[in-house]
Amino acid sequence: MKTPKHSETVGSSLPVSAIVAAVVGCAVVLIGGLAYFSMSGKAGKSEIVIATGPETGTYHELGSAFGRLLESEAIVGSAKVIITEGSAENMDLIGGKGGRADFALTQSDTRANAQARLVASLYEEHLHLLIAKNLSPEIGTIYDLRGRRVSLGGIGSGTRQVARRVLAHFKIDVGRDLAVAPADVADGFLADEIDAAFILTSIPSQTIEALSRKDVIRFLPLGDAQEVGNEADALALVHPSLHATTIPHSTYGRLPERPILTVGVTAQLIASSEVDPSIVRHVTGTLFEQRSNFGTGEERLAAAQRIRERYDPRASSIPYHTGAVAYYTRRQPPFIVEYAETMSLLLTMMVGLYSGYIAFREWARRRRKNRIDAYYVAATRHFDDVQSASKESLGRRHQALVTLRRAAFNDLIEERLDANESFTILQDQIDSELRSIEALISTKSD
């Protein structure tokens, strides 16, 4: 009789219940994991659009650096920075007019639309009122701009808004209203096409610095800083969005030659009310906590270094975004509330893992039981019809049972069988059969 091979003695059937449990468990773990990583990476998968300003302006430089920082910190997946004329256009984009922007840099005096929400007040911007150097003997005050060729800034820019407000307040009609971008003002002065120019920017400004190096400009003040109730004070009184300020002496090399009284506004970051509060909260935190990382070395922006965290709802005409408020007030919900979704997913994953473990344990138990049953069947088959077997056949059966017992012990050592009562019964059965066969062989010898 052929001795069963080791592989033939092992049962391999898998219960339907174990299969179902294993599949369900794996599916739960997989879906839970995907959902968790999808939720945890929500901000990082978002694409935002940031409206800035002219390509050579501080707004565009600052917005571009901030966009790169948001991407590197994985706050958003992609930050698209768009070039605009400035604050007025940016506010329109926040409101969905002419396109769509999620965030924008604007001046504090820009008329807000219904969808605009304040994220942060950034730094002060100064109105630089410049005149051609050769006209400095003729233009000594703001009133001398009547009939002159004056650049009020690009259409849609914040500079134009302030310039028109200043001229309207003093009832000054210029000779020609020129819409010249700050980057082109120098060429206008050099070509004798511009008598004066308004430029609203932070200080120090690279554009103004370049103009001063060419030695084609002089600064025009808005009154005497030593006088109480000067022109700058009047503007700030009539237009609360403006405030009196000073451009210090020698801010740009040797210019201005004395402190220049002027007006200023506050640069601010705004967002659409439709932007997810969680994204705005992370953006706000990154703005203040990572401002030292707006570039490195010489690339680090001077404007960014002046950003300070300030939160005063009463001082702003634009309501704060709820996401920004959450950052400023550092509202921390209870642990269970804040991490409820994460905890739920983790619990689901644990249940799935436990279900898979139970299914695996059941499969292993059933597999071991099938294996011990196969040994029982093999041992019984070797002992069939031993009474009528020849002495030679009894010898082969005896050797097969010894081999079978050795295989069972090997499976026990390798933990493919359990050291339980079933294993003991199998060993007793094999020992009994071996003794019986040995007795029959002895009888046949006689």
Image (spheres, grey):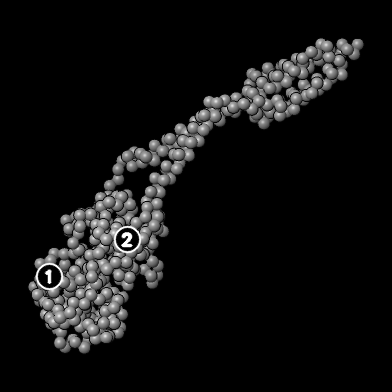
- Quadrant of the image occupied by residue 259: bottom left
Question: Farthest front residue?
Answer: 98
> Residue placed at 37% from the left, 55% from the top?
47
Identify residue type, mark 2. Ile
Element under disc 2:
strand
Residue that badge 1 annotates? 235
The residue pinned by badge 2 equals 50
Q: Is residue 111 left or right of residue 44?
A: left
**Side (left or right) of 307 relative to 403:** left
Residue 258 vs 110, above or below: the answer is below
Q: Is residue 359 visible?
A: no
Q: Between residue 97 and residue 335, name the one nearer to us.
A: 97
Q: Position of residue 218 (x, y in %)?
A: 22, 83
Residue sitting at x 48%, y 39%: 30
Residue 412 image position (x, y, % from top left): 67, 27
Position of the N terminus by quadrant? top right
Quadrant of the image containing the C terminus: top right
x and y, in percent, of residue 401 in the image:
77, 21
Q: Is residue 22 above or below residue 227?
A: above
Mark 2 crowd level (few <14, some 14–19, many ≥20, 10 Å Cα): many
Mark earlier in primary sequence (1, 2): 2
Label 1: which secondary element? helix
Which residue is at a point 24% across and 57% down the rendered structure image? Answer: 95
Q: CA distance from mark 1 to mark 2?
A: 31 Å
Foreground: 435 or 102?
102
**Residue at the spot 27% in from the left edge and 85% down from the top edge:** 190
Is residue 1 visible in the rendered structure shown here?
yes
Q: Nearer the viewer, mark 1 or mark 2?
A: 2
Query: Compared to 152, does 395 lie above or below?
Result: above
Task: Say which amino acid is labelled 1.
Answer: Leu
